Every structure is written in structure tokens, then in C-alpha cells.
Amino acid sequence: MDTNLSTKDLRAFLALSQTRNFGQTALQLHTSQSALSALIARLEEQLGARLFDRTTRSVSLTDAGRAFAVHAASLLRQTQEAVQAIQDTLALRQGKVSVAALPSLAASLVPVLLARFHADHPQVRLSLIDTLSAHAFALVRDGKVDFALTAADPQQEDLVYEPLTQDHFVLLCAPEHPLARQRTPIALAQTLAYPHVSMSPTASVRQYVDEALGREDLRFAPAFEVDHIATIGALLSAGLGVGVLPETACQLIAHRGLVTRALSAPGIQRPLGLVRRKSPPLSPAAQALRALLVAHFSAPD
């Protein structure tokens, strides 16, 4: 049986099943008795069963009507809940946003922006995954996150990359280090006269340094290669070398009291951007968080 029931049909049936009076129900529904009678007749035709026994003096539910009444209220409630869920989603009263971000961003800027978003939309659930760019692309493509904040443009047809800002690299060293006394920007090649503490070759931070030195036909041979920025901070603080890191990563070891110095031109710049799928479009909640991120990076310093 192919039926096409509307909420209007369900409301009319339920109202009549309660009042057992066409005139009273018509007034309640702000319609005429003839229109209500026609609606009930169409409903019975769709269902293939008489729902009400009618006499000149009374209206009563048939067995089929009583059976339908058990489910009609549930159908109406579920429809109303579905409509409310859509309205809540559009109004950001519910929903979920999952974000992947580079570890340096996930441990510095992103939590601040998530807290700002949560203050405005406390019912939206937030999820953050800290990961490197290659894995972040896979998470976006598989729909496991709504978007990712990365340092690389995937340049793949199914993904959209939106540039946000540039992350500038700086030199870090202990206050007692000779380079800490230099006030002018320092050439990257000049820093090679001292031991370096660096991320491992698989990290994008290291790859930007390798590429910059490669353009000058210089080979990078750090004294220490580690996987965590916190370890770099500890080694630099102990005076075991100098390091070159993006400014966002420097925030993670600011408590070490290290000296930062600008690199002379051309320096090293790491692009930061937002990666998302072309389709389906972002949910209202994800779109709102994306707008917050874009606004943050677009705002003047």
C-alpha cells in the first residue's frame, strides 16, 4: 500500500479521535466540517480502511481506527522531533564538529578558538585530532573530520585548500648563547656554525629547513634529531645548540625562557591553510567554526 500521510492528516485524525465530534474538531483545527470530513475520507481511502463509525449522533473509532491511533501519535511526534532537530542544527543548538590540526596548532591557537566557539555554541560537540598533514588529508577525505588545519596544500581534486596565513620561522637559543647577543636578523647559513637541535626528517618543520638550506647548496646535519617540540625546548634550554622553528611551535616552549631572533631574508615561511572536501558541503556548525577561523586569521594584528 502506497500512502502519503501528512502531519495535517495525523493531527486531524488524532483530534477527532479525542473529541469524537466533527464540529468541535473543525473549530479546534480552524477549518470547516466539510473540509474535515473530506480530509478524513481521503485518509481512510489511503489506508484502505474505515477509521470512524459515524451516525447522526455519535462518532467512534473502528478497530482499524484504534490500531492506527496507537501509531499516529508516535508518527506525529517523530516528525516534529525531526523538524526540531533540523531547526536546532541550523541554529547551532546541536551538532558536532571534528577538526584535525598540526600538533603545533592543536597545542596553541586552536584550543583558544575552540573555547571561543564553545562559549557561543555550548550545545555543539567539538573534537580535535592532532596529526601531521599527510594523515590529516586522509581524515578529511574519509569524512572522519570536517576539515583540517595544515601546512601544505594537498593539490588533489577532491579536496579544497583555503590559505589562512604564513607561519614564519625564527631562531631559538639559550640566553647565554653567542647568537642571543645579535640584535639584527640572522642568516640561516650563519647558524650552521653552531650545533642544531631539530625535528626528525619526516616532520614538515624539518623539511622546510632542509629545503631552505638546499637552495643554498648547504646540507643540514643537526646534532640532535627528536620527534617532539618539548624535547627541543629542553635541549635548547640546556645550551646544547640552537633551533629553527615556526612561531606557532615556539609558543609551546615559551616557558623555557629562550631567546628568539628573526632570520634574515628570505627566511623560511610555512603556509597554513584549511583543507576540506568539495562535497558534501560543511554542516552549519562546521561552517560556523570555519568562519571563526577565517575571521581570526583575516583580522588585523
Image: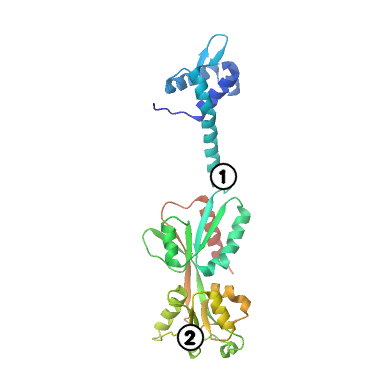
Determine whether, in the image, residue 204 is placed left or right of residue 156: right
Question: With respect to residue 180, does 92 lie above or below?
Answer: above
For marks 2 and 1 on the same chain, the one whose residue lies earlier in the sequence = 1
Q: In this view, which residue lies farthest toward the top?
A: 56
Q: Is residue 202 visible?
A: yes
Q: Is residue 51 visible?
A: no
Q: Nearer the viewer, residue 248 or 74?
A: 74
Residue 88: give its label.
1
Residue pictured at 59% horizontal, 57% vertical: 117
Amino acid type indicated by mark 2: Ala
SS state under label 1: helix
Question: With respect to residue 280, does 247 lie above or below?
Answer: below
User: x, y (%) of residue 190?
Assistant: 49, 89
Amino acid type indicated by mark 1: Asp
Residue 223: give its label.
2
Residue pictured at 52% horizontal, 54% vertical: 97
Q: Residues within 10 Å of mark 1 (few under 14, many from 20)?
A: some
